[in-house]
Image: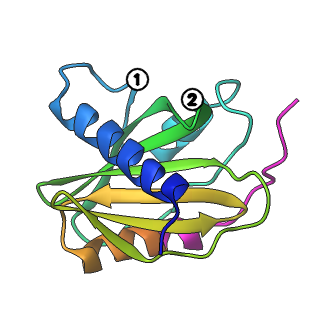
Amino acid sequence: MASANDAALVTEVFDQHVATLAGNIPLQVVSTDRHTVKPWFQGRIPFSFNLPQGLPSDTTLDGANLTYLRNQPVAQLLYSIGKHRVSVFLWQRGGAPSANRGLIEHSGFHEMEFDAGGLAGIAISDVDPNRLAGLVSAITSAPTVDTRPSR
């Protein structure tokens, strides 16, 4: 059974994703180029990450935002899978990796928690869960980077 803390995180991720979909606020970095999106975060978050070189069919990177979850800076990567929008949140994990809770259903959306090279991540979308898992697999297969705080 998920803890109250886990349930709060699921709700917070859902709220961030829906706000991004519903808002008229443009993305902070708009680019399909992973070599533009990743460097944009330098100095904005205390960790680094790699983006996958290849994405599943019909999947594109749209851009990214700097946001906060649990009062921690988080990279929010925005993807499209067909006509569905996907938010992928990455943040520096405090402590040991948590048990993967698998697929979580929340208000018609699917949330998938994962570990990516020492970082914590959650992907959320209303896309078919298998297609969401394909994107998560591409992200977790990207080469890992040093997740120590940047100097």
Residue 68's x, y, as percent?
52, 32
Q: Is residue 146 magenta?
A: yes
Q: Which residues are magenta?
A: 138-151
Give the vertical position of 36 relative to 141 (above or below).
Answer: above
Quarter where residue 123 is shown = bottom left
Residue 41's x, y, as percent?
60, 31
Q: Is residue 54 among the parts visible in the rendering?
A: no
Residue at the top extreme, as displayed: 25
Gap between marks 1 and 2, in whole Å? 9 Å
Few, some or many residues within 10 Å of mark 1 (<14, 14–19, 20+): few
Pick the front one: 57 or 101: 101
Q: Is residue 46 magenta?
A: no
Residue at the left extreme, as displayed: 83
Relative to residue 131, is residue 75 drawn left or right? right
Number of numbered discs visible in the structure rendering: 2
Relative to residue 140, is residue 106 drawn left or right? left
Q: Which residue is mark 1?
A: 28
Question: Quick one: SS at disc 1?
Answer: loop
Mark 1 and 2 residues: CB-CB less than 8 Å, in contact? yes
